[in-house]
Amino acid sequence: MTASIAPIKQSSSIRTNRGSYWITTFGCQMNKADSERMSGILQKMGYELAKEELTADLILYNTCTIRDNAEQKVYSYLGRQAKRKKLDPNLKIIIAGCLAQQEGESLLRRVPEIDLVMGPQHANRLETLLNQVDNGHQVLATDEQHIYEDIATARRESAICGWVNIIYGCNERCTYCVVPSVRGKEQSRTPKAIKNEIEQLASIGYKEITLLGQNIDAYGRDFNVGEYNYSGQTTLSYLLEYIHDVKGIERIRFATSHPRYFTKELIDVCSNLPKVCEHFHIPFQSGSNKILKRMARGYTIETYKEIINYIKELMPESSITADAIVAFPGETNDEFEETLSLIEDIKFDLVNTAAYSPRPNTPAASWPNQLSENIKVDRLREINRLVEKTAKARNIRYKDSKQEILIESINSKNNSQFMGRTRTNRLTFFPRSSSNGKSYKTGEIVNVKINEIRPFSLTGSLL
Ligand code: SAH
Ligand code: SF4
Ligand code: F3S
């Protein structure tokens, strides 16, 4: 048992001050959304946000294990805190998220200074788990959970754009991917719970919501069994229509889409609903059908292209982004070239790329045909060059165009500018007041003329 009770500081308010906390979030939007909920729980318990990591009384690392480098990064952060704890035994260290789930008890053995190891399905249970820590236990919470709903009020990073989970987990079995084993089975939230959350966000001034799921177009399929029996009617298309008219919300986005479940019906619905933004993030992973098969992705490049073409047909302005993996086990040079050709063909606005990284408990990790580090580095460099070139070429269409921008915040690097996004999700910077002196506030939607384009962002002036 390594835990001890946090110092109770004297406080003039009625609520007990439990000390300060710091959360570092690694990984994807799912983790970011979980961190916002855990942050909300800590504040409700009486913790306050620390000014900096190294003085916080409670450290929470919400971890990622998608690739080996993500995992190693967590260990290097953790090493620092474990050292600190030797000098300050009152420090509480919590490891949450995907690496916590993957490593479980072995994390406690490797770093005995940790007080609590908790998997992503336990995020909403943070208060209960911390109470166990306060009672002197070193706690491990990685068992399969039904995710408890709506007990946490998130403390959100943005006051304008909010994330709303609609489905947790993933039922796919992509042969390279650790997510299903760390995030568990798909669990869809009910349309009612989702709408309630969006209405609540709208009532406090949020303008944009992004619906979140690892495999978002699979939304609702777990309703066909168990507690809710919607017999296949409750799809993402249905949900978009159901939540569309929440007053105050101006923009709706969703991520991440899986090509296997991305239907024409969904594209029709998106093109008919004015608040749904013209940005689609649909990872293809590889441009080679042979590799897709070995990845167990469940679609071909031909069906992928059909989806993209139909999107472009109905919404020609759309931006299309994706993820791709290079140097998957056994990937030949020709197969790699097929991925490059797909990028040239489709002209993606952005592709997140990564070299294949073997992950624990995944089939591809034990295949004998692993590629060398050199090939990984070379292919990654080559694909990134192409992605940057394509992104820049795609951005040319914005030059001198008028874009509708939702003002999200002041540009942290230049406080005379605002930062916002186009409907197509391009980051855009522009002066805070127009030439006639009119000034604007965050949360407003303004028209901006784009003067300057870079591969991944734009600059403009208010119209
Ligand atoms: N659910 C999403 C992706 C989630 S993981 C989908 O199915 O597309 C985010 C991205 O990480 C993946 O799209 C993939 O490109 C990358 N990734 C996942 N496992 C990986 C691995 N073992 N090595 C390298 N990249 C990986
Ligand atoms: Fe991983 Fe595949 Fe699930 Fe995406 S769909 S999270 S890549 S297993
Ligand atoms: Fe990482 Fe977990 Fe997301 S492994 S990418 S934080 S689902």
Image (cartoon, rainbow, N blue to C red):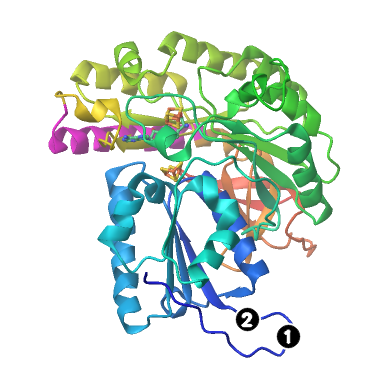
Where is 65 relative to 167, above or below? below
Question: Which residue type does callout 2 highlight?
Answer: Asn
Magenta stretch in the rendered image: 370-394
250 lies above or below 223: below
Check contact, mark 1 vs mark 2: CB within 8 A. yes
- Mark 1, other Cα within 10 Å: few <14 / some 14–19 / many ≥20: few
**Residue 142 seen in the current view:** yes
Ligand 1 occupies quarter? top left
The correct choice, above or below, for 64 with respect to 222 in the image is below
Quarter of the view holding residue 47: bottom right
What whole-number distance in Å separates the C-alpha atoms at marks 1 and 2? 8 Å
Q: On the rendered structure, is 140 left or right of 380?
A: right
Q: Residue at x 79, y 61 (%)?
A: 436
Q: Position of residue 298 (x, y in %)?
A: 43, 14
The numbered mark at residue 13 is 1
Q: Is residue 393 covered in magenta? A: yes
Q: Secondary structure at mark 2?
A: loop
What residue is pinned by disc 2? 17
- The one nearer the camera, 382 or 374, is 374
Which residue is nearer to you in this view: 313 or 308?
Answer: 308
